[in-house]
Amino acid sequence: MTERSSAVLQIQSAFPDLTAEHPSERVVQYRVDKSRLPEVARFLHEALQGRLALLFAVDGRPFEEKYEIQYVFSVNSQWVLLTVKLVGQDRLFTSITPSVHAAQWYEREIRDLFGLIPQGHPDLRRLVRHEHWPKGTHPLMKDFLWDKAIGRQQGEYRFRHIEGEGVFEVPVGPIHAGIIEPGHFRFSVAGEPIMQLEIRHFWKHRGIEKLFEQQTLTTALPLAERVSGDTTLGHGLAYCEAVEKLFHLEVPRRARYLRSLFLELERLHNHLGDVGAICNDTAYTLAHAHCSRMKEQVMQLNDRLTGSRFLRGALAIGGVTHEVSAIQQSELVDVLDAVERDFAELESIIFANASLTDRLETTGVLTERTAWDHGVVGIVGRASGMDQDVRRDRPFAAYGELGVNVALYRYGDVRARLRVRMDEIHESIRLIRDIRDKIPQSPLVGTSDYQPQHGEWALSAVEGWRGEILYFIMAGDNGRIHRCKVRDPSFANWPAIQWAVIGNIIPDFPLINKSFNLSYAGNDL
Amino acid sequence: MFRILKKSLKTGIVTGQHPEPAQSCPSLTPETHEKALPFTQSLAIREVDTGSCNACEMEMNALTNPVYDVERFGVHIAASPRHADALVVTGPVTVNMERPLKDVYKQTPDPKLVIALGDCAIHCGVFKGSYAVTGPVDRHLPVDVRIPGCPPRPSEILDVLKRLKRST
């Protein structure tokens, strides 16, 4: 019996009155009554070990006077989708945060963007809308104009306070000392150790999901590439995969191999940069200098291959825009062979340095339990023993034919996150060699005549360098986008940092933060 | 220790090993040159992100790597606006970042330059018109230098900074 049917069978035996629908491959959908939802969600999370991967709302207007709330659980390698319908003037839904902790930010986000209220949520402060946004501003409601200028009101965010002798607060941000993105961190400390960290984000909220709704399915790729610049290709690919599912479009094999190649190049330049940056935050600038040199090499390579250092414009709906010739491929592999030798030497230098490893070990430990509770994904999850990688579990692009070795560490400290990156650098270079050997000949772009109807939707997952990127796209009329939900891995991982830093000293925070290296842009949308 | 030395010797000097800037940025106006006169010896930059996609940040970071090594031209990145001669602003100005941007500008001592880096900072790029975007940087601050690109390559940023420092 396959895993797929076993999950369905277990749900069937626990809830005989629910009927499974199979809207697409690897997705099973249940329409659940509002009052029963917490029970079903809890069953999926606790009994079936389902990870809450995504939670979002869809405004059904102008076609139907309803809101739908979609809960996406990852059970084994299958998506289980629970759909709750709010009809007419109903604006309330029951919070699942008390039993599924990972839902906390998603539910607050739904409240801010749609004005739907998660009843029983333990924390109903604003998340995306900062306090100066006027009351009643819910931008993803269909009757909210996308280009409306929002006014300003008085208001103040209430941080959680810890009181006691010798406890004081350290506010950091939104503008930081280095060249990094804006975000606010509020530490409560007694002496050196951190007792509590509260993250206040969404300074960079640009209304991306609303901007998607102004576009058509075929024109929104440049916007997807700019959700988070360092993951240009990851986001672009996830967007393309979802749109191609809607168009029932088969991507030619060569294009799928080239997509994997580009994705690995992106992983490579980011991981090389991160290894250096982690070392730099322990003041070991030598490793930083070498790593940023190698990163620059890979980015110049990207530029030569596609005309963009970030691989922008390399993808097209249905395929890729740039051919990589056999000569370019052998040049590519030669450069990467040199980078790998170079990097291996650096690795032994790094780990021979006791004062460096002393800073990395036992710093910023994220336990497997905490990681699981937050539904953490990607490198951060793999450093805390969560064995998951979309490339292996739900193969996309050419990964079904390539085979990926997943790096896995258990300790969850900064060193483990560094090791995951180092292993993945070697694995990426191995994959690129493999791609060069196996790449078939075929056209670069596929086409399709199918036009998706209003209400059809698709869900796609891509393992970007940071982790699992999810896109849910629902088609509207005339090829327009009715709803596009974007989930960068950062959104799932940010809250976990608040737990990883507890007990560490403030000077180690930059190091811990760097070892997570999450995107603010992808989180704030 | 020996290994580190060996590694450094083997690597050699990589500074300057980058392609020439492909597109040349629009030339600087005489007013900008005059405004930049106090900074011909050294220029301290404070980078402010007001809503970019973070690609511009990555390219600013790349300026400090050994290949571009911006410090050899007397340009360095300051940790506080109070130590800065120039603000480099990236991204469209979001509703939430409007106040922090104005605060930073106020805290930067005069005389100062404002450099809008990237298409988003110049005309909001793909984010133009959104409810959460208040407009390009020059709607809020007087902008002296514009560096177009999405994102501009480090060699192009370097080229503008070098010309700014020459100021003749």
Image (cartoon, coloured by chain):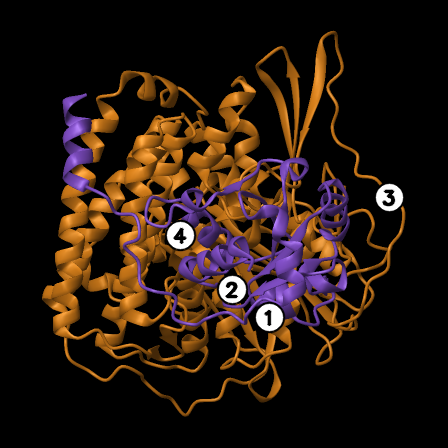
Badge 2 sits on which subunit? A
Q: Is residue A469 above or below residue B12?
A: below
Q: Position of residue A200 (x, y in %)?
A: 67, 39
Number of on-image labels: 4
* Disc 1 target residue: B125
Mark 3–mark 2 Cα distance, whole angstroms, equals 31 Å
Q: Earlier in the sequence, mark 3 or mark 2?
A: 3
Q: Earlier in the sequence, mark 3 or mark 4?
A: 4
Screen quadrant of the C terminus of chain A: bottom right
Mark 2–mark 1 Cα distance, whole angstroms, equals 10 Å
Q: Nearer the viewer, residue A28 or B57?
A: B57
Screen quadrant of the N terminus of chain A: bottom left
Q: Nearer the viewer, residue A352 or A364?
A: A352
- Amino acid under disc 1: Gly
Q: Relative to B166, is A111 on the left or the right? A: right
Badge 4 sits on which subunit? A
- Amino acid under disc 4: Ala
* Disc 2 target residue: A226
Are the residues at dot 2 and dot 1 in contact (C-beta closer than 8 Å)? yes
- Colour given to chain B in the rendered image: purple
